[in-house]
Image (cartoon, rainbow, N blue to C red):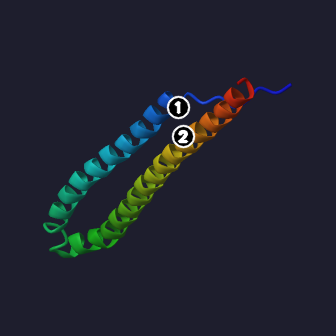
Amino acid sequence: MTQGLNMDSGGTTGAMSSLASADADVEQAWSGARGQIDGLGGQLGQGTLGQAFMAGYRPAVTQIDQTVQQTVAAGLKLAQAGHESIADYVRADNQAASSFTMLHH
């Protein structure tokens, strides 16, 4: 016989909230770092050597920025889906429990 599904909805809710919070922290930290990077970018690239450096620097910064944004968005989607799944589980569990209660009356 197989074991049924049993979710610790409180613990799982906490985990999903932690995931969303971590994503917000990453987004905030990257925003600050990106501001510093952009500030430095305005000071670079003035001479021939600087222009050659910036030709590789700017695309790398753009790629990192896109990756961070995609990662944060994916984490937020996972947290949202997790919260929705918890609500679905609790609703189904309550409905099943009420069916058993009706059988015993």
Q: Name the foreground residue: 49 vs 81.
A: 81
Mark 2 highlights which residue?
86
| Quadrant where the C terminus is found in the figure | top right
Q: Name the foreground residue: 63 vs 17.
A: 17
Place of residue 61 in the rendered image (x, y in percent of width and height, measured from the top left)? 33, 63
Residue in view at x 52 percent, y 47 percent: 84
Residue 95 drawn above or below residue 76: above
Residue in view at x 25 percent, y 55 percent: 31
Q: Name the foreground residue: 73 vs 2.
A: 2
The residue at the far right in this view is: 1
Residue in view at x 30 percent, y 44 percent: 25
Q: Within the image, what quadrant is residue 59 found in?
A: bottom left
Element type at mark 2: helix
Mark 1 belongs to which amino acid? Answer: Ser
Place of residue 101 in the rendered image (x, y in percent of width and height, measured from the top left)? 67, 27
- Looking at the rendered structure, which numbered label has been put on residue 17? none
Residue 2 drawn above or below residue 60: above
Is the Cβ of the residue at disc 1 closer than 8 Å to that at disc 2?
yes
Residue in view at x 48 percent, y 54 percent: 77
Element type at mark 1: helix
Q: Residues within 10 Å of mark 2 (few under 14, many from 20)?
A: some
Query: Left or right: 83 with respect to 30?
Result: right
Q: Residues within 10 Å of mark 1 (few under 14, many from 20)?
A: some
Mark 2 belongs to which amino acid? Answer: Ile
Mark 1 highlights which residue?
9
Q: Name the foreground residue: 19 vs 32.
A: 19
Query: Left or right: 88 with respect to 75?
Result: right
User: Mark 1 or 2 closer to N-term?
Assistant: 1
Q: Within the image, what quadrant is residue 86 found in?
A: top right
